[in-house]
Image (cartoon, coloured by chain):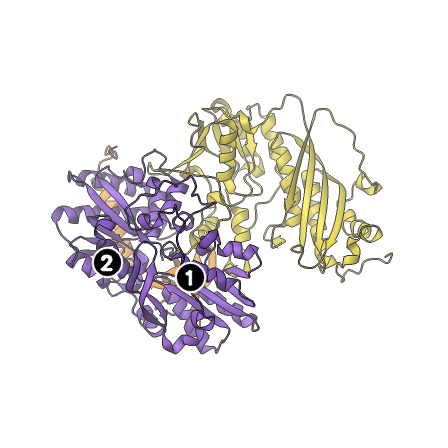
Chain colours: A orange, B yellow, C purple
Amino acid sequence: MCLAIPARVIALHGEEMGTVDLGGVERKVSLALVDAEVGDYVIVHVGVAISCLDEEEAKRTLAMFYELNDQLSESDEIPK
Amino acid sequence: MSRKLDENGFVDLSFGAGGKASAQLTREIFAPEFSNPILNRMEDGAVIDMPNGRLVVSTDSHVISPIFFPGGDIGSLAIHGSVNDVAMMGAKPLHMSVGFIIEEGVPFSTLKRVAVSMGAAAREAGVMIVAADTKVVKKGEADQLYITSTCFGVLPDGVNVGADRARPGDMVILSGPIGDHGAAVLASREELSLTTDLKSDSQPLNDLVAEMLKSGADVRAMRDPTRGGLATALNELAMASGVGIEIDEVDVPVKEGVRSVSELLGLDPIYFACEGRLVAICPAKSAEILLAVMHKHPKGKDSAMIGEVTGKGDIPLILRSAFGGSRIVSVLTGEQMPRIC
Amino acid sequence: MKFIDEYRDSQVIKSLLVLIAREATRPEGYRLMEFCGGHTHALYRYGLLPLLPERVTMVHGPGCPVCVLPISRIDAAVELAARDNVIFCSYGDMLRVPGSGGRSLLKAKAEGADVRMVYSPLDTLKLAVRNPERQIIFFAVGFETTAPATALALKQAAEQGITNFFVFCNHVLTPPAMRAILNAGSEGSHVDGIIGPGHVSAIIGSSGYRFVAEENHIPLVISGFEPADLLESILMLVRRIKEGHAVIENQYTRAVKDEGNLQAQSLMQEMFELRGSFEWRGFGILPDSAQKLAAEYAAFDAERKFQVEYGEAHDHKACRCAEVLRGQLQPEECPVFAGACTPESPLGACMVSSEGACAAAYSYGAASGAGAGQ
C-alpha cells in the first residue's frame, strides 16, 4: 500500500514500459498509468509507476522547509 | 574410471560412490588449483607442523544461490569466510580443509571455475588448502553445490581478542561501507529484475587484521558482519560482553547503490550481509591510532568510527539518527523479505 | 537519492519538531491516527515517536492490508498453494503471516508447495508463459495503491491470451475502513485528526475522504512518507485542530493530485467489481469494502477456478490484533507482545507484517523507553 519510491525515467520501451534509475540501480517498470518522458521522475510501486513526481511542487515544499530553518534560530532546541 | 575427465562433461552419480571416481574429481579438478606441498602428497591425512601458540579453528557451510554472483562465487566466499572467522579472533590463518557436496548433473566446467576461484582466494589470503573431499548426490538433493570449509590458524601468545571483552567507553570502528555483498546478491536474483553494477565485497581480511594487531591499540573484539549484517554482529558483541552499543546512523558508510536497492525493496542495509568488512572494538584512547592504521591499508581505507560502548546492557544496540531520534536495532529474525507496504 | 534525502534533512526535521512542540498547546492533547501501515513503519524507523511532545499521541490505524486479512483467507491461500501443479506467487509481506494452526505460506513451501516470492504482479505473467503446463496463481493483496498493478497484469493476461494465470483477489478499500474505524464508537478509539495514506491517495485522490471532515468533523492531511513529510503533516493537523477547522488537506503535493490518477482509476473500474461484503480482521464484515474480478475477467478468478471454500477460522485465542487494528490497544499494551508473540513466532499478522504496528514496535522499539502510546 505504501512502499513507493521516486525514480528517474532513463529510457522508454514502446508505449507502456520504461527503465527507471534510482541511484545507479535500474529496473524496467510499467509506465502505462502515467504520462512520463525520459528525464521525468515517477513514483514506482511493485514495478508500476503510479504517479509522476511534480518537481515544481517538490521544490516548493523544500523551499518552505528551508525557510522554516531560517526562521528558527540556532538555539531552538527540541523541547523534551 | 581411469579415463581423464571430459571438460564438456558433467558429474554423475558414479563420482559419488567414493573410491577412485571421487578421488578423480579431487585430483583432476580441485587439486591442481589448490596446489601446495602438503596437498600434493595426496595422503589420507595432511601432516602439519604444530606452530607455537594456540590453535584456532573455524568451520562454515556455504549454500549460497546463485553460486556465481557479481564479485565472487561460492568458492571464494568459502575461503574468505573461514579465513575471516579465524582472523576475527586475532589469529593468523594457515590451513584450510574443504568438503564439496555436488548435485548430479553439474558440469565439470562449473566445478573447475569454482576451483580456480578458490585457489586464487587461498593464495591471496596466504593459506594452503591441505585437505579436500567430494561427494555427489542425486539431482534435487543439493542446489548445484554446497561447500563446507574449515580454517586452522594460530593465535600467538599475548593476543587476546574476544567477543566478551568490550567495555563501556570503548569505541566501535567499521572497516568500510556495509551491505555490498547482500545487496549485490539480492540484486542479481532473477525474479527482482534489477540492473546494477554492485559487486560483493567478499575478500580476506587477515592482512588488515595483522596491521591492526601491530598498531599497539588494544583491539578487544572483532567480528565480520556476515549473515544478518552489521546489526546482528553488533548485537552479538554487545550481548557477549553484557554491554550496550550505540551507533550514529550518519557515520555508517553505505554505498549509493546499496541504499538504492534497500529503498526499492523496503529493506534495511544494516541487515545486509558483508563478506569483507569487520567491526573492531577498542578503548577510546587508542581509537584514533587504530583508525589511522586501518586507513593506511587498502582494505580499511574507508574505515569509520561509528559509535561507542555503553554500560546500558539491557538494550544491546541502539541507532541514533541525525536529528536526535533513536531506535532499537535487534538481531535479524529470518530473512529480510522485500515488502510492498 | 533525489527527492528522498532532502526530506530526511536533520535541520528540517528539528525545525518541524520545534514548531510542533510550540504549537501543540491544547491541554487535552492531540490524538492523531496515522492510517497507513507504511506511515506507522516510518514513525518507528526514524525514531520520531519519542521526539513528539507528550501532548501529541499517535494512534496506529488499520492500514496494513496484510494485517486486516482474516485468517480464513490466509488459510485459503495456503490451501491453494498446496494444490497440485500450482505455482503460487506472493509478495514477500505475506509469506510468514500465520493462518490457522500457525500455517503460513513459508511453512507450506517447506512442506513442498511451490511458493514463489514476486516483486511485481507483471513478473508472474512471465512465469505463466514459461510454464504453460502449470497453473500460476497470484496472491493479490493491498489497498488502492497496489490494485492497479494487479489490474495491469490482468489486462495484459487477457490481451496476450494467457490461460494459466489466475488472481486470488484480496484487494481492500481505504474509505470504508476509515469509516469503520471512525464510527466504531466504544469499539474504537477517538481521534482528533487523521494522517491520510499518501500512495493510496496518489491513486484515489482526496475526494474519497470528504466524509471525514463533513460527517466526523475532524481534519485529514494526506502525507508523504519521509520524516519531514510526516512531521509537516502532524503540524498541519495540530493547526487545523486548534482552529477547529475540519478539512481535507494535501501535504504530499509532489505525488498526489486532488483527482488522483485517473488512468489507474478507470483501469480498476474495468477490471474489478465491488464485493457486497468482505470480512476484515478487527472490523468484522464491512459492506462495499473490497474488490473482486469483474465478470468479464472471471476466467482469471482463482476463487472461481479452484472452488475456494472458506472455513470458520479464528484468530489465535491470545491474539489481540483486532484491537490493535482499531486503535484500541497499543502494541506494547498487548499481554502477549514480545512474550508469546514475536516476529519469529507470531500469533497474529500485526507482529509479522512489515507494516504491522506490533512488528514496528518490536523491531524498532522506543529506545528512550517511552512507548508509542505516550
Q: Earlier in the sequence, mark 1 or mark 2?
A: 2
- At which x and y percent is residue C97? 44, 53
The answer to which image quadrant residue C169 occupies is bottom left
As rendered, which of C242 and C218 lies closer to the eye? C218
Could you tell me which residue is drawn at 43 percent across and 58 percent down? C74
> How far across and down, in percent of the image, does residue C239 sit?
17, 47
Callout 1: residue from which chain? Answer: C
In this figure, which residue is indicated by the disc labeled 2? C179
Instruction: Tell me if residue B197 can be seen.
Output: no
Of all chains, the one bearing label 2 is: C
- At 36% from the left and 58% from the top, the residue drawn is A1
In this picture, is B27 found above or below B304?
below
Residue at the spot of label 1? C311
In depth, the one of C27 and B162 nearer the eye is: C27
Relative to C199, residue B175 above or below: above
Cα distance, mark 1 to mark 2? 27 Å
* SS at badge 2: helix
Residue C230 percent across, percent down from the top left: 28, 48
- Please indicate, yes or no, whether residue B20 appears anywhere in the rendered image: yes
Q: Nearer the viewer, mark 1 or mark 2?
A: 1
Say whether residue C356 is left or right of residue C327.
right
Q: Position of residue B93 (x, y in %)?
A: 68, 34
Q: Amino acid at mark 2?
A: Arg
- Residue placed most toward the observer, C131 or B250: C131
**Image point (48%, 22%), residue name:** B285
Residues indicated by labels 1 and 2 sit on the same polypeptide chain: yes
Q: Secondary structure at mark 1?
A: loop
- Disc 1 residue type (three-letter): Gly
Disc 1 packing (10 Å; few <14; some 14–19; many ≥20): few
